[in-house]
Amino acid sequence: MNERVLVGLSGGVDSSLSTWLLKQHGRDVAALFMKNWEEDDSDACPAETDAQDARRVATAVGVPFFARNFAAEYWDGVFEHFLAELRRGRTPNPDVLCNREVKFKTFIEQAHDLGYPKIATGHYAQLRERDGRFELLRGADPGKDQSYFLYALDQSQLAATEFPIGHLQKTEVRAMAKRANLPTAGKRDSTGICFIGERAFDPFIQRYLGICPGPMMTPEGKCVGEHRGLHFYTLGQRGGLGLGGRRGGSGDPWFVIDKRVVDNTLLVSQGEHPLLYSRCATAIEAHFIAGTAPSGSFRCMAKARYRQSDQPCTVSVENRTLRVEFDTPQRALTPGQSIVFYDQEVCLGGAIIDEIDRSA
């Protein structure tokens, strides 16, 4: 295969090694740095440093380098949706939307405009073609697998994509980058939400949604404090509630167990309350990578959050709405979060958790 390929070079070690590997394989490679967020003086996101690192890698590997600003596309396609979900009291996952709308849509369009029919990224995921259809597979490194964030991609996006390091362990990536003398071989991995990065979440969100105080109540109806705004909290959250020094009770930590948008109330409990657990959820906006949804119901494994271990469940399909029933109660199933389905190493697709059935 000698198709021209444009690598999304972020300035990190994963995309750097992806660029180097493709060049080593004799491909016609170029690199593109995507700027997806407009910083101001109060922002901590080191986009300029990342851009400089990306340019250094492109020079070291010997490939053409491009830089593009996709901040407007990011704002319209990702950030406005993120804020709207927070206003509804939900906990969205912007990384999933960023992949679908920017990294594997706007980026692919830009690559085609530049004459590159293929793109490549440093994601820890793998692809397999069977009977003219593409399957998304988990990355070989279980601790770094990113298929959870890629479930919303369609067949045309996968057909135009390559994941050069998906078959490698992270330790191998670091070692290979060091042997290749890549400038980013020892660079620390970035963490945090895609556009927020490593800056503090609460002050950042407060700039856009402000503060909207309301009562903190126990399920029994006792007021134990005041919250700053439902958008600052998520189900299952421990800490940040200001209740640590509260006298009385069991001495156990406090947790968020629900958010009532209708009366701006944050429900909290001391200790592991039964309301933290549920077996069933309704999920919307279902997307299946094969292009069509299974009919009726099917058994599979699911992850209701990125770091969760696989959980066996039964999924019932009705159009783009799903009912997911887990074999065992799940802790803090959260509206707005993605639930992603697997058949062994194959990512089948996923959906957005909409409602939780705590009575099941």
Image (cartoon, rainbow, N blue to C red):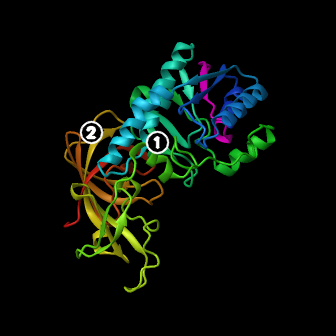
Question: Does the magenta run of residues contain 9?
Answer: yes
Of the two numbered discs 2 and 1 in the rendering, the one whose residue sits closer to the viewer: 1
Q: Is residue 251 left or right of residue 353?
A: right
Q: Which residues are magenta?
A: 1-16
Q: Is residue 318 left or right of residue 199?
A: left
Regarding mark 1 in the picture, which secondary structure is present there? helix
Relative height, residue 307 to residue 193 (above, below): below
Q: Which residue is mark 1?
A: 95
Label 2 to label 1: alpha-carbon separation = 23 Å
Q: Position of residue 260 (x, y in %)?
A: 25, 59
The answer to whether one can see residue 110 in this image is yes
Relative height, residue 6 to residue 311 (above, below): above
* Front-lying residue, 312 or 266: 266
Q: Is residue 265 left or right of residue 304?
A: left
Count of residue discs: 2
Q: Is residue 161 left or right of residue 290?
A: right
The amino acid type of the residue labelled 1 equals Asp
Q: Position of residue 351 (x, y in %)?
A: 32, 45
Relative height, residue 307 to residue 59 (above, below): below
Q: Position of residue 29 (x, y in %)?
A: 66, 22
Regarding mark 2 in the picture, which secondary structure is present there? loop
Residue visible at 46% across and 79% down in the picture: 245
**Disc 1 packing (10 Å; few <14; some 14–19; many ≥20):** some
Q: Which residue is mark 2?
A: 293
The answer to whether one can see residue 134 in this image is no
Quarter of the image for the N terminus: give it.
Answer: top right
Residue visible at 33% across and 59% down in the picture: 333
* Front-lying residue, 69 or 155: 69
**Disc 2 packing (10 Å; few <14; some 14–19; many ≥20):** some
